[in-house]
Amino acid sequence: MVVKLALENILNTENIKVFYLLEIVLILVLIFVLCLAKNRLARLAVDIIFKVFKSESDYKLEVKEAKANLERPVSWMIFSGVTLLLIPLSSVLSANMYIYNFFMKLFQTIFIIARTYVVIILLDLFIRIINEKRKNKNSYQDYVETAGKTPLFYLGVIIKAVLIILAGLEVFKLWSDSKGNILAGIVISIIVAVLVLRDAVANLIAGLTILLQKPFDMGDWIETNAKSGFVAGRVENIGLLSSNVRSDDGTIKKLPNSEIVNNFNVSNDREERSSVIKVPISINTSSDKMEEFKLGVTEILGREEYVLRNIKISSMNFNDLAYIYDIRFTTNLDYEKHILLKKNINTKIDKLLKDLEIETSKNTMYKLN
């Protein structure tokens, strides 16, 4: 009888071990499948999110960039969220509260960091769309004078700082039950942040490299093979995460710093700096006044000592709201003096419009380059 009971205990113990082993294998398989599928699931989730943007066609560039930036943090949100649902179902982890709590805190930390980054990206998109709408509504000189940082930009910076502080406090509270856990939480948070924000961290490191080592500066002409293709143009802005490059046709490309830092050529033999100003003149303006405007702009540019003679003024573009005057000129000044001269020319063109009593369309998209 005693032998029989001993055998039953051994069999039960073996059964429990087999059950635990199968459970661990099943969890590992689910996590592996989730790792493989999380990027596709994230892409699908991002597409669903942006179906609510009815005006997506009006802001394709902004939305495309936001979608690309959202995929990684959303994939980690999905991964951590599903894992948090699976952990309580595991009898192996539930049997050891220390291990159970550790993994719960780990994946909650991943979820908090990824969620915060997603909100920041969506906030950036909102600000960019508002600024694009502002360009459409503002008059010519209003946009010239406010082409820099706007109050909305600084409000966005404040909100982002608050979001990051709140996320930090949330993670701290999660790990604050002991000094050892606080240290572990800090280390884990750094590792998780690097994983979730890998692209942002790479761009930040590249941005700091550019700013400190100065392989090129604002105003330099660079050529680089970005993911979107070959890009050549004048560097207009160097940020911590991305830089703006303006090509000869006036279009601006926003390039991640990590795509530029190890793959670019600086052309120092280009001493000329080009500018393009697009002025939307009301469709009701008479042909005589438009001719006077064209002659006036030619005279303004002709009087500038540092403006080279290859001046081009055309009104080939138009729509149902305005004639779009395309004014192109080059200078042989360094970048800072070139920008000052361009602002001076903007002021003179605005004065010319007022003197000729020519209205500019407030509903037409145009660029000041």
Image (cartoon, grey):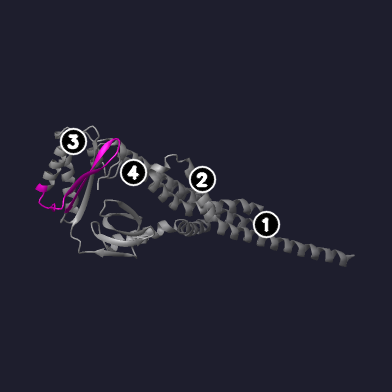
SS of the residue under disc 2: helix
Residue topped by disc 2: 48
Contact (Cβ within 8 Å) of mark 1 with mark 3: no
Residue 187 at what x, y percent from top left? Answer: 48, 60
**Badge nearest the viewer, 3 or 2:** 3
**Count of numbered circles in the view:** 4
Is 317 a magenta residue?
Answer: yes
Q: Amino acid at mark 2?
A: Ile
SS of the residue under disc 1: loop
C-alpha gap between disc 4 and disc 3: 40 Å
111 and 123: which is toward the camera: 123
100 and 43: which is toward the camera: 43
Q: Quadrant of residue 287?
A: top left
SS of the residue under disc 4: helix
Residue 131 at what x, y percent from top left? Answer: 33, 41
Q: Amino acid at mark 1?
A: Ala
C-alpha gap between disc 4 and disc 1: 50 Å
Horizontal relation, residue 213 to residue 40: left or right: left
Residue topped by disc 1: 95
Q: What range is drawn magenta here?
A: 302-330
- Against 325, is 7 above or below? below
Q: Amino acid at mark 3?
A: Ser
Residue 279 at what x, y percent from top left? Answer: 23, 41
